[in-house]
Image (cartoon, rainbow, N blue to C red):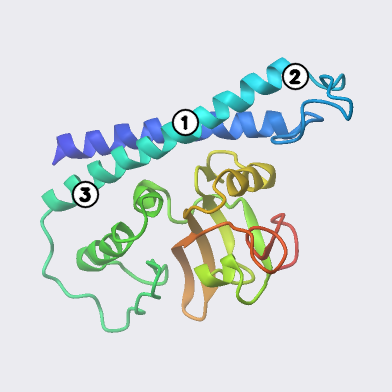
Amino acid sequence: VATLKATALAAADARAAAEREIGALAGALAAMPCGIDGPLVDAEGFPRDDCDVLQARTMRHRLACLHTDHKQLERNLEKALHALHAAVPRSTSAAPASAPAPLPPAASVPTDGPVTATAAADAADAVASTTTAAAAMQLDDPFGAAIAVVGDVAPGGPADEAGMKRGDRITRFGAISGSGGGGLAELASEARLNEGGAVGVRVLRTEAFGEVSLVLSVTPKQWRGRGLLGAQVLPLDSAA
């Protein structure tokens, strides 16, 4: 078990390193006049003179490569987590009757009482049964630093379909995490880069019985409404 845990931690470290570089590149590109995906030529077809076109191309290429690498790193981490989970004995102790039930389809972790080994294992099972990105979140701090807060959610939009709600605080969106220094610009870039594909999202939500950490899966896409998510994603100091 110790070896499997070390393997999982090494895989998590590799993923975290890639995420830090993704965040740094996305932030640097967002600060450039051409942005993350803006045109590199002017209206007449000449290279823009307000940004370093060669540097922007190099950074965009590296960012695309990192996103491809990140998918493999998530698969490596998922494999390591499944191996570790299979090797850990399951406790037969029952969860207290007063413990709140999980909130389907996401895995919830209550904070207002003790969490037994059985409850923790059940939560791990629920997370592992979702997307690869969601399974890779098992080594995240469930109550880590937030990136942004969700504002209005349009009915029928991608965020609504994923179960996101007004007031949810996003701590991870795909490769971007609050603990890794990610911000709104990086989150927006991650949504654009993953348009049409499922993205693992971890949010903190306040329920009547306390705060819970939820793992969701959202697919950024064009739909009848505005934006790829169909929800406002606001700075943390905005009123939810």
Left or right? Give the position of 17 relative to 75. Answer: right
Q: Earlier along the polypeptide chain: callout 2 or callout 1?
A: 1
Whether residues under marks 2 and 3 lie with C-beta atoms below 8 angstroms apart, the answer is no
For the residue pair 34 and 114, the one nearer the viewer reads as 34
The residue pinned by badge 3 equals: 82
Q: Position of residue 202 (x, y in %)?
A: 48, 57
Residue 232 spot, x, y in % from top left: 70, 63
At a point 36% along the width and 36% down the height, the residue shown is: 72
> Would you say 156 lies left or right of 207 here?
right
Sequence-wise, which precedes: disc 2 or disc 3?
Answer: 2
Answer above or below: position of 168 versus 101.
above
Q: Nearer the viewer, mark 2 or mark 1?
A: 2
Locate residue 177 relative to residue 12 in the image: left or right: right
Q: Quadrant of residue 3?
A: top left
Question: At 25% from the left edge and 46% from the top edge, which residue is drawn?
Answer: 81
Residue 105 higher or lower than 6, as above or below: below
Amino acid type, label 3: His
The secondary element bearing badge 1 is classed as helix
The residues bearing labels 2 and 3 have C-alpha atoms spaced at a distance of 43 Å
**Amino acid type, residue under disc 2 in the picture:** Val
Q: Quadrant of the N terminus?
A: top left
What residue do we see at 33% from left, 60% from top?
127
Residue drawn at x 53%, y 71% is 161
Closer-to-camera residue (58/181): 58
Which mark, by number, is residue 18?
Answer: 1
10 Å neighbourhood of mark 2: few (<14), some, or many (≥20)?
A: some
Kindly identify which numbered label has been placed on residue 53: 2
For residue 21, what is the image quadrant? top right
Percent from the top left, x then y, of residue 131?
Answer: 37, 56
